[in-house]
Amino acid sequence: MRFLLPFVFVFAVVRPDSCDLTQSPKSWASIDAHNVFLYAVETPASFPSSSFCSQDDFMSNTITVHAHVHLAKPTASGKDTVTTADPSVSNCANFNSQLKYCRSHCSDTALLKRIIDVGVNNGSLPLSVSEEVYLELGSPQDWTVTTLQVDPSRSSLQINYDFYNDKYFCSVHLKANNVNNSPYSLLVIASRIIV
């Protein structure tokens, strides 16, 4: 199931903030995005709303997504932030020559390379990227892919997100140029959820 939005999900299956973040195991990953205009989420057609949910607040330009990540093993977690400011650290740009910048939290190198290639090949459209990454994963019934466009013209844009150093979680913030040589930036997060 897919959806692309400027702030509003286009299907009713995902209920606003229906997740109980106190539910065990303590492997919740959240995305809290402010002033993001375009984003897309690709999910299985039927997924437990207790393991994946979102809330969009059009009035405050805020998008919140929660995923109950199925971790391969207990692992370290962390928090990161994406803004439109010039990035200082790039840890995966050598995987594709078209990248201008890339920062990842992804222990599965093969998945990281696939996400980068899809992000570069599909350009700045979050729906195309989420859909293609999900298809590359084999359309599994226990994975979700969220893609947020990091629009450089929105100086107040900020995306705070949780990450895990686990093979079932991968986040990639990339900057590249599209076919018209126009720069674009995306944050792509793929995670296996508890079903």
Image: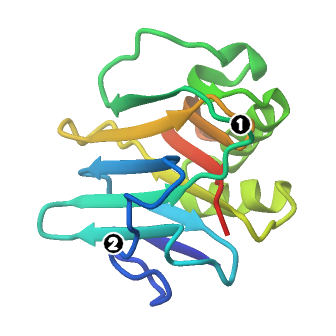
Q: Quick one: SS at disc 1? A: loop
* Residue sitting at the far front: 24
The C terminus sits in image quarter: bottom right
The N terminus sits in image quarter: bottom right
Above/below status of 107 relative to 2: above
Residue under pointer 2:
17
Q: Crowdedness of circle 1 by 10 Å Cα count: few (<14), some, many (20+)?
A: few
* Residue sitting at the far bottom: 12
| Mark 1 residue type | Lys
Residue under pointer 1:
73
Front in this rendered view, residue 156 or 9: 9
Q: What percent of the width, then of the height, locates residue 83?
A: 31, 31
Residue at 41%, 78% (x, y): give it.
9
* Residue sitting at the far left: 59
Front in this rendered view, residue 178 or 79: 79
Residue at 23%, 58% (x, y): give it.
62
Q: Quadrant of residue 172?
A: top right
Q: How far apart in space, not on screen, are marks 2 and 1 (Cα)? A: 26 Å
Above/below status of 59 relative to 152: below
Residue 23 visible here: yes
Front in this rendered view, residue 76 or 129: 76
The reply, left or right, for residue 111 in relation to residue 170 is: right
| Marks 2 & 1, CB-CB < 8 Å contact | no
Please tell me which of labels 2 and 1 falls first in the chain. 2
Front in this rendered view, residue 181 or 67: 67
Q: Crowdedness of circle 2 by 10 Å Cα count: few (<14), some, many (20+)?
A: some
* Residue sitting at the far top: 88
Between marks 2 and 1 in the image, the one whose residue lies nearer the viewer:
1
Residue 181 visible here: no
The reply, left or right, for residue 25 in relation to residue 33 is: right
Q: What percent of the width, then of the height, locates residue 193?
A: 64, 59
